[in-house]
Image (cartoon, rainbow, N blue to C red):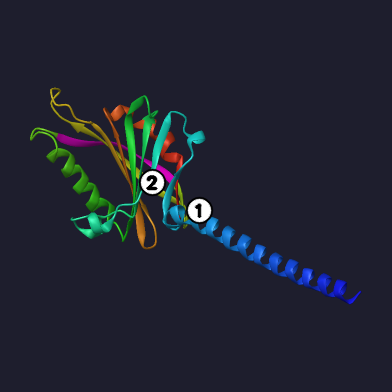
């Protein structure tokens, strides 16, 4: 009877060792699968990003966020955005005429100074006979990592010769945060069309 007991004991030891080895293999395998799945998205998940809720803005779409690479940027680093997103009227296959660019930047912003710079830029991109007139302003809100923020959307008409093919409707908005800010730049063929951008703008938030 003793040999049987010994064989039974050895068999239990083998089964126990095999079970431990199997558990280790399973744990290591699950870890490798998890770490592989995490690598592509882990960096993006840690970056600030804009979120566009398409259900809240029918007739608008986006290609998603972009995170500019500072090492590839040769301009003033202070002008470099941390994250950007474009929302466009229409669909990917059938684009509309208007779009809005959202940029998230570090630092502070002097709204009046930057508005003057933007208006000067519009004229520089047109003919010398061009001018810019403000056609209105709208109070908007945006959800941010610091809560709901109110800001003003300034809308302009670029007056240029009819022969010149330019986007005449332009709007700018600046959402101030504690150590950063969000810039919006909306563009349409005519200033009258800027009103259609409001649904798309309202469907965008910034998350940390």
- Quadrant where the C terminus is found in the figure: bottom left
Q: Which mark is residue 37?
A: 1
Q: Is residue 114 above or below residue 99?
A: below
What kind of element bears circle 1?
helix
The residue segment tinted magenta is 131-141
- Image coordinates of residue 49 in percent, x first then y, are 42, 51
In this rendering, is residue 146 above or below 156? Answer: below
Other residues around mark 2 within 10 Å, as few (<14) / some (14–19) / many (≥20): some
The residue under the point 19% across, 30% down is 166
**Residue 199 vs residue 23, the one in the foreground:** 23
- Residue 192's spot in the image, x, y percent? 31, 27
What's the distance in space between the residues labelled 1 and 2, CA to CA?
20 Å
Q: Quadrant of residue 105?
A: bottom left
Q: What residue do we see at 21% from left, 45% from top? A: 118
Sequence-earlier tag: 1 or 2? 1
- The quadrant of the rendering that contains the N terminus is bottom right
Kindly report the secondary structure that dominates the magenta region of the rendered protein: strand
Q: Does 133 appear in magenta? A: yes
Q: Is residue 94 above or below residue 12?
A: above
Q: Nearer the viewer, residue 30 or 171?
A: 30
Q: Nearer the viewer, residue 174 or 37?
A: 37
Q: Is 130 left, or right, of 199 in this rendering?
A: left
Which residue is disc 2 drawn over? 65
Residue displayed at 54% across by 57% down: 34
């Amino acid at each position: 009877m003793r040999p049987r007991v010994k064989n039974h004991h050895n068999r239990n030891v083998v089964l126990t060792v095999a079970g431990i080895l199997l558990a280790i293999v399973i744990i290591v395998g699950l870890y490798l699968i998890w770490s592989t799945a995490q690598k592509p998205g882990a960096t993006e998940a840690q970056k600030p990003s804009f979120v566009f809720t398409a259900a809240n803005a029918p007739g608008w779409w986006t290609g998603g966020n972009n995170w500019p690479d500072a090492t590839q940027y040769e301009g003033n680093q202070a002008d470099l955005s941390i994250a950007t997103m474009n929302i466009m009227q229409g669909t990917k296959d059938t684009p509309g005429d208007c779009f809005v660019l959202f940029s998230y930047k570090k630092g502070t912003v002097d709204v009046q100074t930057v508005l003057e710079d933007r208006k000067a830029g519009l004229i520089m991109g047109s003919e010398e006979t061009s001018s810019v007139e403000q056609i209105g302003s709208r109070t908007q809100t945006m959800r941010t990592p610091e809560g709901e923020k109110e800001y003003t959307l300034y809308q302009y008409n670029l007056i240029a010769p009819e022969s010149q093919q330019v986007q005449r409707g332009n709007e700018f908005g600046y959402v101030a945060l504690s150590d950063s800010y969000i810039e919006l730049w909306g563009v349409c063929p005519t200033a009258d069309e800027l009103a259609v951008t409001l649904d798309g703008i309202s469907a965008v938030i910034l998350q940390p």
